[in-house]
Image (tube, coloured by chain):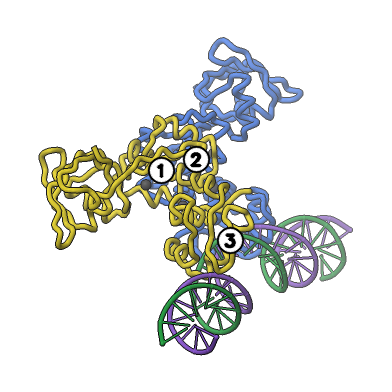
Chain colours: A blue, B yellow, C purple, D green
DNA sequence: TCTTATTTTTAGCCTTACCTAAAACCCTAA
DNA sequence: TTAGGGTTTTAGGTAAGGCTAAAAATAAGA
């Protein structure tokens, strides 16, 4: 059973909202994520239910099925591989890739993705630090922690961002935070949760709690 | 005014059928080329006429406008650049690229095409020898001649194929004809138009008139 | 010129993916 | 246990892009 572009986009949204296939997801949440109306979502959920990529019980939200999870991960794989291509090969900035990848991910050609993967040297993470599922949908996830959850004096390395919006990424570029940077928490202000962070042992960065919450690190 | 994917495909077909914007094109011809019904074509012609990329007079066929020609050439440019990418970078065979390029050509991102062009080193021809329009739609066309139009003892070089179907390209691979090959016409059989051709000064090839008519060369 | 054959358009219908407005449902708090 | 209030679905509509069947226009032959 093949999925249309719209169906793939919905399924991906449902997968993300359900935190990797565990939680059940409400119609309103899908509508917000997809920027459509709940009425349109109801329509689409019926279709996705018929195709058995989600389990749909009217009025009770949806759960993604195993088959649906597999499909969603394939689309995510394609999206992230294209993002790597755009940044590594075509010199796109990391805040310029998402919209284009949102289109490229729907190109139907298993050979294309297989070759692209090889050409990029089987990357494990996209430009935002998100893991790239392999062709079987397996993801090697790293245990990640938002900066605001780390304690003073803890060290680590930035590995991903939670928010991939151009605005946020441009801000990180400006202040000099990037994926791979080694960091140490110097201070946390209790009043507003803002933080002071040492980057690469030389640069001090002040950031709001909101910003810190959208930067993910592994501890070391 | 932006064109949908379907509109881009129709416009491209009309451009090709009109031999580079000169001839006028009939509804039936478009239907055959697009593998749709004439009734569907009538609908689409009205839309394309409204968008002023063609001039449409009911019952009298269509002519592509200057604006339409420009749009068609942009789509063709994208199609051929992607074909070069697939062959040069992803090791696709020249008979495997057309379908995928037919999808990729509709990705909307001027930056993407500009970067892709640079990344491929501004190629002038696609894997089938067809010229790639520049970003202004200019095509540097070479005067090309089908092999069956050449005379005995004439020499030249294969520069393109007229038929890009997988079947034909695979056949050329098998017999060892390729773009760039130096050729000389050794003999032409008057009865059926079949020919004997010397390839790269060492290999003799027999081909039917049908095959010869689909191989394009420049004379030398 | 008249009649027929061919081409093209129109009319009406389908599916997908969206919308608004109204109805139905679920849940919770009085 | 029932009345709101929020959520979700249904009903009905639009636009794009296809289809078939029928009507209309053009082209061709006698
Ligand atoms: Mn992305
Ligand atoms: Mn998408
Ligand atoms: Mn196409
Ligand atoms: Mn080509």
Q: Secondary structure at mark 2?
A: loop
Q: Earlier in the sequence, mark 2 or mark 1?
A: 1
Q: Which residue is mark 2?
A: B137
Q: Chain of mark 3?
A: B
Above or below, A33 relative to B58? above
Above or below, A207 relative to D13? above
In the drawing, what numbered circle is on residue B56? Answer: 3
Q: Are marks 1 and 3 on the same chain?
A: yes
Residue B177 visible (yes or no): yes
Q: Chain of mark 2?
A: B
Residue A45 visible (yes or no): no
Query: Label 1 vs label 3: CA separation?
Result: 28 Å
Q: For this view, does A30 lie left or right of residue B97?
A: right
Residue A170, x across and y down, in percent: 62, 27
In the drawing, what numbered circle is on residue B123? Answer: none
Q: Chain of mark 1?
A: B
Asked if the residue at label 1 sits under 8 Å from ligand 4, the reply is: yes
Q: Which residue is mark 1?
A: B80
Residue C6, x across and y down, in percent: 44, 76
Q: Secondary structure at mark 3?
A: strand
Nearer the observer, A71 or A149: A71
């Amino acid at each position: 059973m093949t999925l249309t572009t719209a169906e793939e986009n919905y399924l991906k949204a449902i997968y993300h909202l359900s935190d990797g296939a565990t939680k059940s997801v409400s119609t309103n949440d899908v509508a917000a994520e997809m920027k459509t109306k709940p009425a349109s979502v109801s329509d689409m959920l019926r279709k996705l239910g018929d195709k058995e990529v989600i389990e749909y019980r009217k009025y009770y939200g949806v759960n993604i099925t195993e088959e649906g999870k597999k499909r969603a991960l394939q689309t995510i794989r394609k999206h992230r591989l294209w993002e790597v291509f755009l940044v590594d090969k075509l010199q796109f900035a990391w805040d310029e890739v998402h919209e284009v990848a949102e289109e490229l991910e729907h190109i139907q050609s298993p050979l294309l993705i297989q070759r692209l993967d090889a050409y990029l040297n089987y990357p494990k993470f996209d430009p935002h630090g998100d893991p790239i599922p392999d062709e079987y949908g397996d993801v090697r996830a790293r245990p990640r922690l938002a900066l605001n959850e780390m304690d003073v004096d803890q060290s680590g390395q930035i590995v991903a961002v939670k928010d991939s919006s151009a605005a946020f990424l441009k801000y990180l570029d400006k202040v000099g935070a990037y994926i791979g940077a080694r960091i140490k928490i110097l201070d946390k202000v209790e009043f507003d949760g803002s933080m002071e962070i040492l980057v690469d042992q030389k640069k001090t960065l002040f950031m709001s709690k909101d910003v810190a919450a959208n930067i993910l690190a592994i501890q070391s």
